[in-house]
Image (spheres, helix red, strand yellow):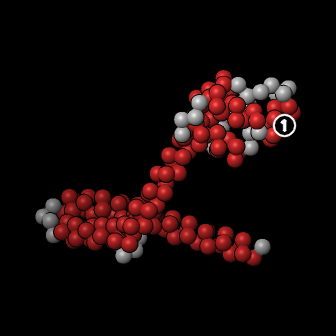
Amino acid sequence: MNMNLKGKIGRLPEALRDEVNIRMRNGETGRALAGWLNRLPEVQALLAAEFGGKPVREQNVSEWRLGGHQQWLRLQEAHRLMQEFHREGQQLDKAAGGSVTDTLATWLAARYAVAMKQAEGEGDPAAAWERMRECCHDVVALRRVELAGVRAGRATRLEGRRQNEE
């Protein structure tokens, strides 16, 4: 994540920034946060080395609350959503008896086969060919996605083998 690492709080070690962000999320005031930070030896060392020993002020906390903290909140929300998507995806895969996308692709391919067979028996050969051409285009797109997934799986397995060999 590309947080603004120029200010006093932005230059803190990640674990301390996370603690600041958690305390902000829990409603701690800027005055309380500044006081807490200024008492920490690692913060005092950073302030001495990079900011002429000037302490963290409420203004620094306020600026962080509007910038870096907002980025952190968005990242936390993204993490939460990804965990939720993952959990729901696993539940759907379990209900499908495998991959939902594989199940859907099989179902869809079967429907295309029926539609193309029906198109064959229609009275207008040009309309039938057009319908089959449209189906073919969609099936090719599905196959490309499927093959890309296969290639990605192979690449992941190869990378895992390389890491195990090292």
**Residue 19 or 93: which is nearer the viewer?**
19
The residue depicted at 18 percent of the width and 69 percent of the height is 118
**Residue 135 screen position, x and y as percent:** 30, 62
Toward which corner of the image does residue 13 lie, by quadrant?
Answer: top right
**Residue 130 or 75: which is nearer the viewer?**
75
**Residue 30 screen position, x and y as percent:** 62, 28
Quadrant of image for the C terminus? bottom right
Toward which corner of the image does residue 117 lie, by quadrant?
Answer: bottom left
**Residue 157 screen position, x and y as percent:** 61, 73
Name the amino acid, label 1: Ala
* Lateral position of residue 106 relative to residue 80, left or right: left
Toward which corner of the image does residue 95 lie, by quadrant?
Answer: bottom left
The residue depicted at 56 percent of the width and 66 percent of the height is 152
Q: Is residue 77 above or below residue 103?
A: above
Q: In this view, does 123 lie above or below 79?
A: below
**Residue 50 or 148: which is nearer the viewer?**
50
The residue depicted at 64 percent of the width and 39 percent of the height is 20
Q: What element carries label 1?
A: helix
Extreme residue in the top direction:
59
* Lateral position of residue 154 relative to residue 140, left or right: right
Q: Can residue 97 be seen in this view?
A: yes
Instruction: Give the residue number, with chain letter if any, for mark 1.
Output: 45
